[in-house]
Amino acid sequence: MDSRRTCGTTTPSRSGRASKTKARLVRRDVRNNLPSARSPSPPPVGTPYPNGSSRGSPSRLPLKFAVFSCANWAFGHFHAYDAAHKGWGDTLAAWLHLGDYYYEYGEDNYPNHEESVLERWSSLRPRNETWTLGDYRARHALYRSDAALQKLHAAAPVIAMWDDHEIANNEYTEGGENHQPDREGVYGTRAKAAVTAYHEWLPTREPFHKHDWHDTQNGPFAYNRSVHFGNVVSFVVLESRVVARTDPNKNPAGNVFLNLTRRFSRSTKDGHQLAPKRWAGSALELELKRLKSDLDAYRSRDDAYMLGAEQTRWVAAEASRSRDVGVKWQVFAQASPVMNGKSPDVEKAADALDAAKKLPPPGSYDSWRAALNAWTAWDDDDGTSSRDSESAFGVGGRLVGVAAARALLALGRYGINWDFDDWRGYVAERVRFLNAVTSSSNRALILGGDSHDAWAGVVPGDRNTWGLGDETDETADSRKESHFASAAVAEFDAPGVTPPGAFEQAFQWAPTELIDEGHKLANFGTMKYARTGNRGFLLLSVDENSARGDFFFTPSVRERTYVPECGASFEVREAGGGKTVPAPKKSGDGDGDGAAAEGLSEVPFRGSKLLKMTDAACPALPESLFVGSDTLGYAG
């Protein structure tokens, strides 16, 4: 990619597009540093930060970065942006948006009138789904009218990358799940319109070949880039949608949540369903295991891509260049969670919550297991006896459908994958990506978003766990031991700004505590933190020795006011002893088949440092969060 990019300010114009005022050209060796009026230029890549930076300055170590993902206008208020600029705006070196900066949907979809916050839904512009250049410009203008977002943009420079909803749902190189050619025309025209508006409205460094849409290195679609902050951190920002992504919408099971629920709603030949107590060894169990096997085979195919070979080689080369000049951390900023994300095992979760005795059972149940048994009609083949009783109700007094409860139970018990639009649907590509990340980084950290929920965890140092083996082998070492003290990569995944997560939307009756514990147990040893059901942002703090992730939540997005909270904090450091990720085996090396070596460029393999992730105490919330008289803001 060419190094000569411009940086500047963005203002709306009468035409509905944004006009950029070029500030200056950035020298080749520091092209991706980000100066702004309130945030001074960091030192050139590889150069230490000077001692004596003023307290609270964006140049003071540790460097602070707020990380966001997924902001849907009609689902609620952008309290996460408000909290970030009020609490940390003056101290942010930059903030990152990992995708879904806005949503393309019209007034009748995600959310519709009933699901929405009425005042936000009523102001949605345009009312239709966006698919023309004028539509995308109008949607950008709407979002940039939000006072909290305006203040955050004014406070610090942004490092932004699109995901799918900036164009269309589950978007890929040739289409999108909700793109309708008969009505909306050629998909390529729509994608060009969306990306044009994106570069107009966001303070991007416009591509060198801004009119050559076929140039995958310097054209408008090729927005992958590196952003350096002295010798502390390099952000390697990835494009995973329009350049190389293959279709994520063709999995053989369709909507797994919906279709599995329908499967449990069907009557068997004798008019009865089989109760979960009797699943073991049954024909139903064989059917569910076959479903898992078919879906695993589909998501393991070698010809499924998110980044593509060219960008994967670029990842390894960028990490190597950053390491060579002495940068301590290479942070790979992209749209989706990368670490293991198996479906939650709610059976193990219920038993664990009962054993821990830290959280009271939901409602009037005697135990978490009793609640789960009631919801799934555990010993009732008909699955009807609990429908008319108090035990059929879950969170918020919601009626629990037995078929939905059994579907949730089956997802975790049999490890059935449901999401094929993130890295779980691209297993071979994930291995290639992780090979590139760990081949020559110094210390590797991944940032993700997209799920609307908050996650923290690691990718194990054992590369044999990077594919499906760790997920399918019940006797694998990773199910018996923790990898938090010896990890190849540490990962923080930011919660969404407003829209609900997949599980809280599909299973609204299920307590988030059960879902969260189920996720951690299903991904034992790699997932350290799971927090579904709450919106907010991640605050990343980085210095030469450590990286820290603080998860801040602004739960009441449906209300005009909110009470911020810190949910959890984690610190990442080197594991010690100079240990590094081992080199992949090549073809002919014993039991190695060469697959592990895929994704490496011509850059010599050096192996990133092994890392450890530990719990940390939540920091005190800044006093600036709790002052002011804004109509929107702190409710205390």
Image: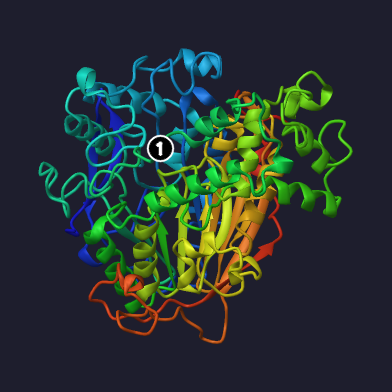
- The residue at the point 38 percent across, 64 percent down is 431
Residue 242 x, y percent position in the rendering: 25, 43
- Compared to residue 283, the image places residue 305 above or below, namely below
- Compared to residue 579, the image places residue 190 above or below, namely above
Residue 302 x, y percent position in the rendering: 30, 58
- The residue at the point 40 percent across, 32 percent down is 102
Quarter occupied by residue 272: top right
- The residue at the point 21 percent across, 60 percent down is 310
Residue 213 x, y percent position in the rendering: 13, 43
Q: Report the side of 285 relative to 92 (left or right).
A: right
Q: Report the side of 492 relative to 349 (left or right).
A: left
Q: In the depicted view, which residue is nearer to us: 427 or 501?
A: 427
Residue 184 x, y percent position in the rendering: 22, 21
State the residue position of label 1: 100
Q: In the depicted view, which residue is nearer to us: 242 or 557?
A: 242
Q: Report the side of 615 relative to 46 (left or right).
A: right
Q: Residue furthest bottom?
A: 577
Q: Residues within 10 Å of mark 1 (few under 14, many from 20)?
A: many
Q: Is residue 633 visible?
A: yes
The N terminus: image quadrant: bottom left
Q: Residue furthest front?
A: 270
Please state which amino acid type lies under the numbered disc 1: Asp
Quarter occupied by residue 484: bottom right
